[in-house]
Image (tube, rainbow, N blue to C red):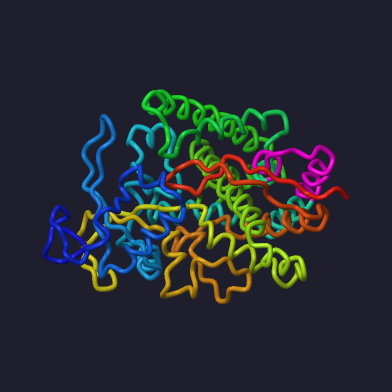
Amino acid sequence: MSAVTGSTPAQADPTRTGTESIDLADPEFWKLPASARAAAFAELRKLPAPRYFTEKPAAGRRPEKGFHALVRHADVVEASRTPSVFISGPGVTTPEPARWVRALFGDSMVNLDDPRHAQLRRIISRAFTPRLLARAEDDIRRVAAALVDDVAARRPDDFVTAVAAELPFQVICNMMGIPEEPRRSILDQVNHASEHTGVDRPLRSRIRIPGRGLRALARMQGMVADLGRDRRSHPADDLISALVTADVDGRHLTGRELGAFFSLLLVAGVETTRNALTHGLKLLSDHPDQRDLLLSDLDRYLGGAVDEIIRHSTPIIQFRRTLAADHDLNGTRLAEGDKVVLFFGSANRDEAVFADPDAFDITRTPNPHLGFGGGGPHYCLGAHLARQEMKVLYRELFTRLPGLRSVGEAELIPSNFDNRVKSLRFTFDPS
């Protein structure tokens, strides 16, 4: 059933005039400049109902029905906070994960529904004790200071590899209790596992890269499972020990669940924070008035700047859900089995919620952005950690490196999933 009652996805809808050339299911759309994509979403938000897009099946996969694009803030929030109807179990990524991949590697929490999702989330939430979180915040300050020491001494060119990727990776490894020796190997596995997840890749890579990515994921999960077995016998004061020795309703994380959770932390937590940190430096460099305002009173403006960076750059572009029952979504009738895609970046530019939504304004208040999801059970577990990492690192950078700024344009990787930055040149004034 179409989003518009009484029509079908293949039928032309006269209300779509001016938007027919927009195709969110076409990889070519995600290669357009960011400004062109933002303008397209602005047009889609004007439609009276979510538009339906037909997907072309990937090679060797069954045809997809397509999806209804949820581009308004209210629609994304309602779908996020009605998990009994908008379920995640069939898969939240595009394309949905193959059954054999899920059977082999285990299910990521993002692809689970209650009661299993709630059970795993309780185990993980209880492992994040006040003591562990306090130690993590101390560690963020220590790692950030060391990174800025290194930048001041070496003056590297690329902000992504020298700073933005290192902070969340080191913090997560320290929190989990990953020994120093395998960290470089694990980071290599993360890079291989997430390599070419965008849309700009040649046919040859489309055939070869997935195998490399799965092998990298298997190696990474194997390393963590081995650590989990060791910690179960010899627990330490770290997150892995807490997860594998927990007793929540008689349950702790199994080796496979631990590997899936660690993969989620690294691929999601490291990637998203890395991209947000990098976009933030570019935004503050491109808006010197906002940079000057921030530096005039870091204590006053830093929290708002972080939230505005997350709103404006929206590190995760989309997640999908499947209808478990017929549902009326703000006046739009959706049918059981329908697919919807939640476009967080579009929701974060919704004119009905944000005044002058394309502007970058670190004083914006309120700022109910959906950069960590639209609420509900899948709201990002790492939201507080990511905010702390960004605030601490920006304070270190702008306090100790006068004139810190990006140079030229960021090298972006076209993707319909995350707002990914490959590299960004940067500089600062001699001390």
Q: Does residue 282 appear in this view?
A: yes
Name the residue located 31 percent from the left edge and 58 percent from the top edge. Answer: 69
* Residue 131 image position (x, y, % from top left): 72, 57
Q: Is residue 78 left or right of residue 63?
A: right
407 above or below 350?
A: above
Look at the image and tell me whether residue 253 can be seen.
Answer: no
Residue 415, position as x, y percentages in the image: 44, 44
Residue 429 screen position, x and y as percent: 82, 50
Tell whether position 202 is magenta: no
Task: Report whether 190 appears left or right of 41.
Answer: right
Q: Is residue 160 magenta?
A: yes
Q: Quadrant of residue 76?
A: bottom left
Left or right placement of residue 335 versus residue 195 in this view:
left
**265 or 430: nearer the eye?**
430
* Residue under the image location 40 percent in, 60 percent down: 39
In the figure, is residue 336 to the left or right of 304?
Answer: left
- Residue 159 in picture, x, y percent from top left: 68, 43
Q: Residue at x 41, y 23 (%)?
A: 208
Which region is colored magenta?
142-163
Along the line of sight, which residue is nearer the eye, 48 or 60? 48
Predominant secondary structure, magenta span: helix
Q: Which quadrant holds the N terminus?
A: bottom left
Q: Measuring 37% from the left and 58% from the top, which residue is drawn there?
A: 342
Count of picture labels: 0
Q: Residue furthest right?
A: 431
